Image (tube, rainbow, N blue to C red):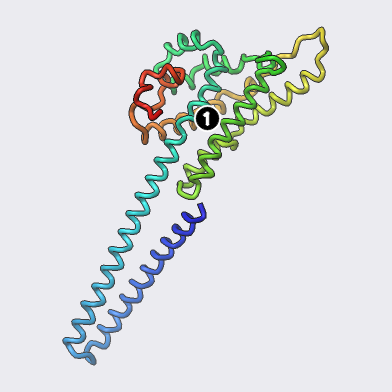
Amino acid sequence: MNDSIIMRYIRQNIRTKVFVNCLILFLLIVFLLAVKKYIPDNYFVNSITGILGIVLTAIVIDRVNICFDNRNKKIHRDIALRYCKNPIRFYCYIWFTIYDLNQLSRKLKFQQFQNLEDFFMSDDFYNSVCSFDFAKCFSSGKTFAQFYADKQNKSEENFQNILAKYASKLSLEDIQRLEFFGGGAHLSKVFVSMELLNTYNISTQNDNTQATPINVFKNVSKENFQKHLKKLLALINDYNSVCNPVERWTLETLTWGIFEDANANEHDW
């Protein structure tokens, strides 16, 4: 990361120096024109030709540096987005299982949606998330509130790892998007609050009483809920734009299990 920052600093300073040098050369030409009558013709022509050659060389070098810089930025951005493949799938699966825990019935329900946007923006999805009881037992000694809080932390860690590796080579917009899914989203705090409510729920629960249902998502407006998911869809679109067609994430490909993938033989195992 430090090397790339240093190289970026050097390139920026090179461009500044090129501009300053061009300005100096321009002023020198103006000066030579002003004192032309005091300079022999042959010497004057050679001086102007040499100065123009230097200026053109500086401009060409600057353009080449810009082209290389833009190309390298695109390469690094494409690589970073490709590394988002599994974090995106992991994060989508969090929402898929909240929507419907049963894989078979979930696949049947997905048939009513045309694409990911149709699913994530649907009333059915929003209402299902808002009605999910996170106080239910997931496994022995663990509730869904704890389970999904752990999964959310893991998802944020996945995006933070990509950000830590490529932050110096990405645009501000790309960095902000990765930071958003790396823990910056306000919606992620909902999972934390439900885990805290679950802890309180357990501490006050008697042996003869049932746990109080927990779901903080019902306090989140549909508009804010969809704002979050629109950013997820934008990230998926960015990923799909740089990956191979067989690796693009769609509602259909995301619902397959990892070993059920119809294009499994296309992947680098």
Of 68 and 140, the residue lying toward us: 140
User: Is residue 78 toward the left or the right of residue 131 in the image?
Assistant: left
> Which residue is depicted at the point 26% across and 68% down?
56
Q: How many marks?
A: 1
Name the outermost residue toward the bottom.
38
Of 197 and 269, the residue lying toward us: 269
Name the outermost residue toward the front.
269
Q: Picture coordinates of residue 91 (x, y %)? A: 53, 27
Q: Picture coordinates of residue 234 (x, y %)? A: 44, 32
Residue 269 lies in what quarter of the image? Answer: top left
Q: Which residue in the protein does label 1 denote?
A: 227
* Mark 1 surroundings: few (<14), some (14-19) or many (≥20) residues within 10 A: few
> Which residue is depicted at the point 28% across and 79% down?
29
Q: Amino acid at mark 1?
A: Lys
User: Is residue 203 toward the left or the right of residue 258 in the image?
Assistant: right
Picture layout, residue 140 above or below residue 83: above
Q: Picture coordinates of residue 170 (x, y %)? A: 46, 46
> Which residue is depicted at the point 45% across and 9% down?
108
Callout 1 secondary element: helix
Q: Picture coordinates of residue 250 (x, y %)? A: 40, 23
> Which residue is depicted at the point 34% across and 49% down?
71
Picture layout, residue 207 above or below residue 261: above
User: Is residue 29 toward the left or the right of residue 97 in the image?
Assistant: left
